[in-house]
Amino acid sequence: MRQKDAKVLERDSILDILSPIRRAPVEILSEILELSCLPENGIFTADFDLIRHAFYSLSSVCVAWRNAAHSTPRIWSKICLSVYMHEMVLLKLGLDMVGIKDWIARSQGLPLDVYLDYF
């Protein structure tokens, strides 16, 4: 049974290599991330946490997607901070001070839109 499981894993890894999305240019991956993670109307709402979670999920798919995310400054050019968020929630979302500095650095000099949620 172990040998069969090993062969199945080997086959799956080979099929993963052949996946069309792995051959997509980084520009296409960046566009996918932008369309998935930025609000359609450009205005952040209370759903920003859901958007941010989706972004982190997509950037965790594989190394190529993470690299595409980190090299797409537009998705880092907007940030929403909640004035009333508890510190533990901020840490859970990766928005401690180091996380905020990294977020801003990845915007690579694009104008930064900062939204403050105080409700």
Image (spheres, grey):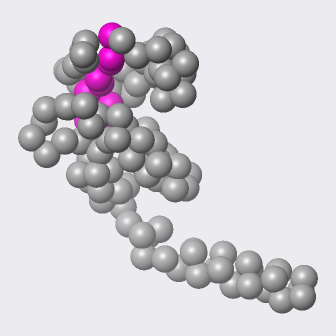
Q: Is residue 25 above or below residue 10?
A: above
Q: Horizontal and vertical percent for residue 104?
A: 36, 20
Q: In which quadrant is the N terminus drawn?
A: bottom right
Is residue 119 or residue 66 the one in the foreground?
Answer: 119
Please name the residue shown 40% across and 24% down the image: 103
Q: Is residue 75 above or below residue 6?
A: above
Quadrant in which residue 37 is drawn: top left
Q: Horizontal and vertical percent for residue 72?
A: 33, 40
Q: Is residue 59 visible?
A: yes
Whether 78 is among the magenta residues is yes
- Residue, far right: 2
63 with respect to 40 (left or right): right
Magenta stretch, residue numbers:
72-83
Q: Is residue 114 visible?
A: no
14 with respect to 53 (left or right): right
Q: Horizontal and vertical percent for residue 80?
A: 29, 23
Quadrant in which residue 25 is drawn: bottom left
Is residue 52 or residue 75 the one in the foreground?
Answer: 52
Q: Horizontal and vertical percent for residue 41?
A: 9, 41
Please name the residue shown 35% across and 56% down the image: 29
Q: Is residue 54 above or below residue 115?
A: below
Quadrant in which residue 43 is drawn: top left
